[in-house]
Image (cartoon, helix red, strand yellow):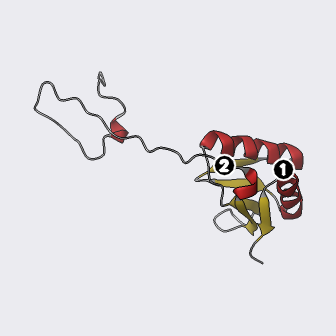
């Protein structure tokens, strides 16, 4: 089946049109501009809910584009020597490395502090 109108999942409720010259267009959500590091307020905490008891260090509060989030994620993973990922404007780093993450973020110029227990 030929899909002329773009990705079907992005049609936001449009199912079918009888108009032969109907052209579907949708507004793409714009990503927020990345704030400079000194204006970012990042919270670093330990999380293990929904992860089969495994601990992850969760960094939240990042405001910016997904490319900049991925860059910061890669930096943290490299410096900590562990795996991790980023999604939904949060960074997950495997294991309990809160102290190291806070030190790295502060060294890079971010406002970062430990949150939670």
Which residue lies under the disc numbered 2? 86
Whole-percent x, y for residue 47 in the image: 72, 67
Bin the neighbour count of mark 2 within 10 Å (Cα to Cα): few under 14, some 14-19, many 20 and up: some
Residue 21: image quadrant is top left
Residue at the left extreme of this rendering: 18
Residue 39's x, y, as percent?
Answer: 70, 57
Image quarter where the N terminus lies is top left
Along the viewing direction, whichever of 112 and 21 lies nearer the viewer: 112
Nearer the camera: disc 1 or disc 2: 1
Residue appearing at x 75%, y 60% in the figure = 56
Look at mark 1 in the image and give the residue it sits on.
108
Q: Quadrant of residue 67?
A: top right
Pick the front one: 71 or 40: 40
Locate residue 15: give its quadrant: top left
How busy is the neighbourhood of tag 1: few (under 14 within 10 Å), some, or many (20 plus)? few
Q: Which residue sits at x=88%, y=53%?
A: 107
Tell me the element at label 2.
strand
Residue 9 drawn above or below residue 117: above
Please tell me which residue is depicted at 67% across the width and 42% down the height of the picture. Answer: 68
Q: Nearer the viewer, residue 32 or 10?
A: 32
Tell me which label, 1 or 2, sits earlier in the chain: 2
CA separation in Å, label 1 and label 2: 18 Å
């Amino acid at each position: 089946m030929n899909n002329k109108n773009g990705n079907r999942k992005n049609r936001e409720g449009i199912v079918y049109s009888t108009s032969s010259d109907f052209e579907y267009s949708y507004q793409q959500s714009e990503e927020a501009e990345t704030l400079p590091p000194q204006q970012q307020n990042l919270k670093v905490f330990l999380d293990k809910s929904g992860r089969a008891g495994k601990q992850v260090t969760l960094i939240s509060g990042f405001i910016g584009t997904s490319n900049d989030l991925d860059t910061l994620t890669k930096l943290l993973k490299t410096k900590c020597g562990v795996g991790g990922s980023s999604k939904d404007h949060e960074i997950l780093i495997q294991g309990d490395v809160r102290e190291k993450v806070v030190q790295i973020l502060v060294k890079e110029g971010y406002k970062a502090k430990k949150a939670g227990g």
